[in-house]
Image: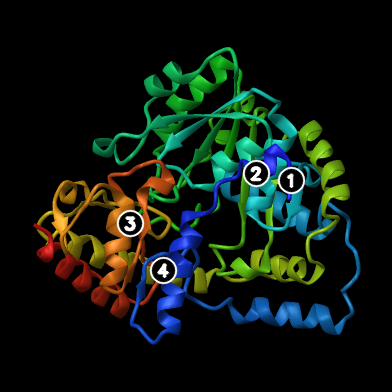
Amino acid sequence: MNTTKRISSISPSLTLAITAKAKAMKAEGKSVIGFGAGEPDFNTPQHIIDAAKDALDKGYTKYTPSSGLPALRKKIAEKFEQEQGLVYAPSQIIVSSGAKHSIFNAMFALVEEGDEVIIPAPYWLTYPEVVKVCGGVSVFVEGHKDNHFKITPEDLKKAITPKTKMLIFNSPSNPTGTVYTEEEIRAIGKVVEEAGIWVLSDEIYSKLIYDGVRHFSIAQASEALKEKTVIVNGVSKTYAMTGWRIGWLAAPADVAKAIDSFQSHATSNPTSISQYATLAALEGSEDELVAMREVFNDRRKFMIERIRSIPGLDCIEPDGAFYIMLVVKGLYGKRYAGRKIGGSLDVADMLLEKGVAVIPGIAFGDDECVRLSYAISKEDIAEGLNRIESFVKEVF
């Protein structure tokens, strides 16, 4: 079968590959602790589920405007102003089938063939694939481990060329949990503003931040930056609604209009029932979000302390999301069960033999680490880390 270059160039997801192996082992009756979770292990709050049931009962099962329910777009715009001081007209909000869909829409609207897109590393593995599909060229800028995986304004400045079209900025970050401070974001924003490039600001984890750390959007840094920024967010992580598939973007008016036109032909509207559920999420209490965040924070602290008690391992403390990058480079060059450890893929494969599923860091642009999620029970975290410690003890 002959497929187009753009589709055949897409790399398979290492995350899905590891997850598939873990599921196969479980199907065989083997015990596997899966640290690969990219979604909260909580159910969607009941008032949101009830809103979806009510929408069904009322027959709200028809097409909506391609850009989303007017009431939902209005509510999202209100939340931007209330929570971040960012003023958008409802027409500047486009609701899509998940934040990933919004990222693709933004990239498709702004990136031309040959345009360079700067991506700080470690990065969410989907970013470079979307750049590739849209004809762009990914330019990776390595974040510094001694700076919590963050890039500096100097790093960014060095990466910008006449071909640079966009910076993808993700804070809080998947996979690192990194959260940039307001001061750091303003400094990076200054470089962006001087270069006149676009920013795609992925803020899907913006409400999963711990210990008083505050989220600050690069669009808040100046009005000029806001006019060159597309913000992406959604309900997947914040309200444990990953399967509902609702995300959105906020963009300058002309960009939003173009994306609306494209989406009307590509997918039509996002699911009507999920939109009504999302409206209930945004209008309702955030008590369950607060409770979920407290549980995540407890797990985060437990995991950090436990990792640092294992000789040969280390981690960089995350301030947001629900991931930890476990630094395993100290094991490289050594052997496990007679086999040499050469990188994060080897570590991930060997840990599977111990009944632990992790995501190799090479998938995120950092082969010195593996990613662990703490969106699993504390009991599973404890058992999984016990197995990891057992693995390390057998490495020589």
Which of the two discs, 4 and 1, sits closer to the camera?
A: 1
Q: How crowded is mark 1: few (under 14 residues within 10 Å), some or many (20 or more)?
A: few
Which of the two discs, 2 and 3, sits closer to the camera?
A: 2
* Disc on res. 8: 2
Residue 291 % position (x, y): 44, 73
Mark-to-mark CA distance, 4 and 1:
40 Å
Label 4 close to label 3 by CB (< 8 Å): no
Residue 246 % position (x, y): 69, 61
Q: Residues within 10 Å of mark 4 (few under 14, many from 20)?
A: many
Residue 248 % position (x, y): 69, 51
Residue 199 lies left or right of residue 208; in this view the side is: right
Residue 10 % position (x, y): 60, 44
Q: Which numbered disc, 1 or 3, marks the residue that appears first in the sequence?
A: 1
Mark-to-mark CA distance, 1 and 3:
52 Å
Which residue: 58% across, 12% down? 162
Residue 335 lies left or right of residue 109; in this view the side is: left
Reading the image, the residue beneath label 3 is 211
Reading the image, the residue beneath label 4 is 375
Residue 347 lies left or right of residue 284; in this view the side is: left
Label 1 close to label 3 by CB (< 8 Å): no
Label 1 close to label 2 by CB (< 8 Å): no
Reading the image, the residue beneath label 1 is 2
**Residue type beneath disc 4:** Ala
Label 4 close to label 1 by CB (< 8 Å): no
Label 4 close to label 2 by CB (< 8 Å): no
In the rendered view, would you say 140 is above or below 266? above
Q: Which numbered disc, 4 or 3, marks the residue that appears first in the sequence?
A: 3
Q: Which numbered disc, 1 or 2, marks the residue that appears first in the sequence?
A: 1
Residue 238 lies left or right of residue 4; in this view the side is: left
Q: Residues within 10 Å of mark 2 (few under 14, many from 20)?
A: few
In the rendered view, would you say 263 is above or below 228? below
